[in-house]
Image: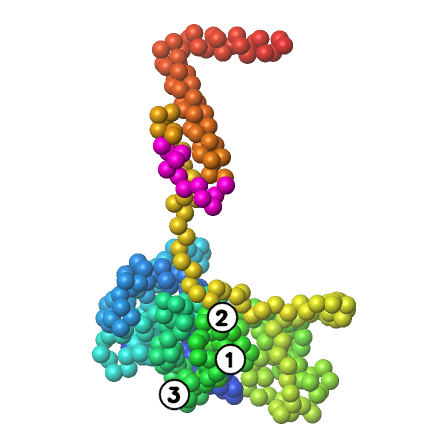
Amino acid sequence: MADRRQLYVEMRAQDLDSIRLSTYRTACKLRFVQKKCNLHLVDIWNVIEAFRENDLNTMHLSAELAVARLEAVLSTILYQLNKRMPTTHQISVEQSISLLLNFLLAAYDPEGHGKISVFVMKMALATICGGKILDKLRYIFSQISDPAGIMVPSQFDQFLREALKLPMAVFEGPSFGYTEQAARSCFAQQKKVSLNTFLDTLMSDPSPQCLVWLPLMHRLANVENVFHPVECSYCHTESMMGFRYRCQQCHNYQLCQDCFWRGHASGSHSNQHQMKEYTSWKSPAKKLSHVLSKSLSCASSREPLHPMFPETPEKPLNLAHIVDTWPPRPVNLASDYSFSHSMPTSGNPFSTKKLQYNLEVADRLADEHVLIGVYVNLLQNRPSTWLVGVALSSGDKRQC
């Protein structure tokens, strides 16, 4: 309980409540929690591995986990993280476990029952961990889809309920609380939602209103260390970090993210003016070259938001008749006939050549093993004779 209060006290000290836009305010708060618990250093693959180590992948999604089991999963994630970190960048594992455990219990077990379901655990950690948003959404879809690769609406509804408890835990429930209308509006026109449709919808710009804070949280992470050598027109800071905003009406009026988020304005500029958000800095020379290349380009250089995936889940490949065994199995002449006729040759014109190649390799390796055995026996039984012979042969080669 003390750790939970400490987390909220430190979050209030950041003055994040003064951010006037609810989307940015929510994303900043959850990003603060993510970094405070060191989850920004953990991606979805680390989370999946921890689930496997704790056998959560074999449990039904509706099964309940006690607090001790939840703590064990978090311990696996964060102790494995410390092993991957350099010795100079070690984290306080116990403190991170305590902060994260108390935050999750505050969000998903406010009544204090001491249990949360496997589904809640997976959705919460998949949503708030770091890494690529594409990988996170693919994992989430795998948990709410059927074996044919089609999203189950009731499962998506349950995911949305659990995901929106995270904004509620940072006191943003009035802006991003769950409603049935919000769930229906995400895929209103879609009867069957595949993986590609799911990714298109949640990674679109703008995203569904109820989840718009999720991709913004990842954008915040991507621009945290972006440097803009531009002076803020309000606070007159000589340079900016993070987002940069430029007014589309006032000449050369630019704001840093802190001033824009809090509604600061000066001179003839007004908060009603349209602002453009920048996530990088380009020098005037680069801008000119970009404009020229874009005007001379015949084809569009715009790339899709994400790679396209198969409509149906891919089945594991059966490589039993494709991959050769290594090392090759020794064969004898008596079994060559039966072995060659037992291999399937239909649809594989190279099967006979492969078999012949394997036999030749096996014979060559067998000869080499025999020679190695002879050399070892000579060295063990008559080392002096062997050394004299080697010396004479090397002398003959030098004379030649």
* Quadrant of image for the C terminus: top right
Is residue 341 magenta-colored?
yes
Q: Inspect the image, locate mark 2, and give the three-letter code of the amino acid beneath it.
A: Asn
Q: Is residue 86 visible?
A: yes
Q: Inspect the image, locate mark 3, and give the three-letter code of the amino acid beneath it.
A: Glu
The answer to whether 297 is drawn above or below residue 356 in the figure is below
Q: Residue at x 52, y 88 (%)?
A: 20
Label 1 crowding class (10 Å Cα cut-off): few <14, some 14-19, many 20+?
some
Residue picked out by circle 3: 180
Residue picked out by circle 2: 196
Distance from the alpha carbon under mark 3 to that under mark 1: 17 Å
Residue 207 marker: 1
The answer to whether 215 is drawn above or below residue 174 in the figure is above
User: What is the number of callouts on the image?
Assistant: 3
The span picked out in magenta is 338-349
Viewer-nearest of labels 3 and 1?
A: 3
Q: Secondary structure at mark 1?
A: loop
Q: Is residue 162 visible?
A: no
Q: Residue at x 38, y 87 (%)?
A: 180
